[in-house]
Amino acid sequence: MQTDRGSRSAPAPKLGFVRRFGRTERALHWAHATAFFVLLGTGLVLWLPALSIWVGRRSLVKEIHVWTAVAWAAALAVIIVSGDRKGLRADWREIERIDRDDRNWLLGRKAPQGRFNAGQKLNAIVTTAFALLFAASGVLLWLSARESRFRWDGPIVVHDALTLLSLALVLGHLYLALVHPTTRHAFRGMTLGDVRKDWARKHHPKWSDENERQTDV
Amino acid sequence: MNDRLLGRAAFLGILGAGAAGLVWGRNFADLAGRVLPDGVAAILPTKGWRIYTIRGIPTIDPTRFRLRIDGLVEQPLSLSLDDLRELPRAEQMSDHHCVTGWSVKNVQWAGIRFDDLLAEAGPLPEARWLQFFSEEVPYVDTLSLQQASVPDAMLALDMDGKPLTKPHGFPTRVVMPQMYGYKGVKWVSRIHVRRDFVPGYWETHGYDSDAWIGKSNFGFIEGQE
């Protein structure tokens, strides 16, 4: 089994550290994150009456929102096509597999976790699905202003609901990545690519065990 | 139990719910207004209205306000709010549709039909278009005289039984329910009667000038027989 996916595209991690995310995974994460915050900011200005009134410049904000969405889709496509597709496929397989340990973990019981814990898996699943739905409803909204046959209530409802749900999701994500003492070390994995071995052993023991076995061979 | 199916089911389940929402979803704002705490609901567009401005809401002193009617008219006019209140009053209930996809049903408007408003000024025979200037510079928009005389078009002074509020265009706004909301210029302070057509603010940003709801893209241009 191959678990150390970063190794093909990056130098070996330094002593005491283990590679958690390769360049493709990190590029995908940060391209998505950057676009998400620009879209969220401009989207809130377009959506919330108080912000719309305060900021004004509606046509400019709208242009930024739409073109950021285009850039987001293009950037993700480029990263996926030119990057480590095999690694991404393996990630997705890993994310979709919610095993008995994951289910126990989600129920609040102590259970050993792999490279992704069950919460991270759910976050990845929800974020991916939301991104696709944001894109679909966004394209329909864009079309509805041009072609009235695309005009029905649904897209704006979905886009609004996704905004609120994503806002909650991203606040939780930011808390765990930046503030919460036991999880914030993961931020290093998503920026530099590697994490401390002892942290991995403690919080992601199943993944850590696999790595140890591999190195021992 | 197949472990992989669980994650896949969650993923497809969310996509399915979202797709259903695309087709059947409605009135989320209404629902959000009911389930969210008051503090959150207060900042969301829960009554259905979303207030769009390009420079911010202008503050207008009602005692100094004048509506100017000029251009191709026999008698240019400058009307105070009291003058406007003395003109024949019309009332209606109509739906408001925004081009960005939201609607507000059963809005009660009261104001003046354009034919009554223009009667005293008297448009000249060559007059074809009414260009509405907002106090929110540079917002302008144009209706043809024909469009402005459809039975449910008016210059509104009241909404839902009260004088217009600032966000809804105090003291006067155009109401054109058969067209998308961007044709309904708010904070109107001047109506310029013209022979030639001039595109409005949003029309210079790619929207149709003949913004009939449900048929904006059929190239319906009244002035070009």
Image: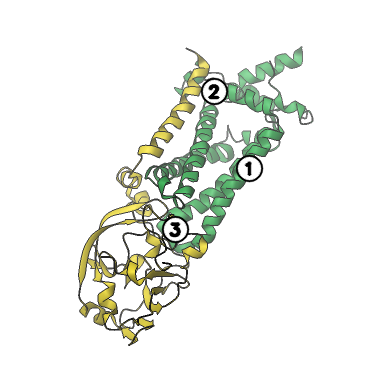
> Residue A106 — which label?
none
Judging by the rendered image, the residue that carries numbered circle 2 is A96
User: Which SS class for mark 2?
Assistant: helix
**Position of residue B6 measured from the top left corner of the image (x, y, whole percent):** 48, 20
Q: Residue furthest bottom?
A: B75
Q: Which chain does tag 3 point to?
A: B
Q: Do the residues indicated by labels 3 and 2 lie within the same chain of the protein?
A: no
The amino acid on which the numbered mark 3 sits, given as a three-letter code, is Gly
**Position of residue B33 measured from the top left corner of the image (x, y, whole percent):** 32, 47
Q: Which chain does tag 1 point to?
A: A
Who comes first in sequence, dot 2 or dot 1? 1
Q: Do the residues indicated by labels 2 and 1 lie within the same chain of the protein?
A: yes
Q: Quadrant of the C terminus of chain B?
A: bottom left
Residue B25 appears in which quarter of the rendering?
A: top left
Q: Is residue B164 left or right of residue A174?
A: left
Q: How far separated are the C-alphas under marks 3 and 2?
A: 49 Å
> Residue B219 — which label?
3
**Position of residue B201 measured from the top left corner of the image (x, y, whole percent):** 47, 67
The amino acid on which the numbered mark 1 sits, given as a three-letter code, is Ala
Q: Can residue A17 be seen?
A: no
The amino acid on which the numbered mark 2 sits, given as a three-letter code, is Glu
Chain A: its colour in the image is green
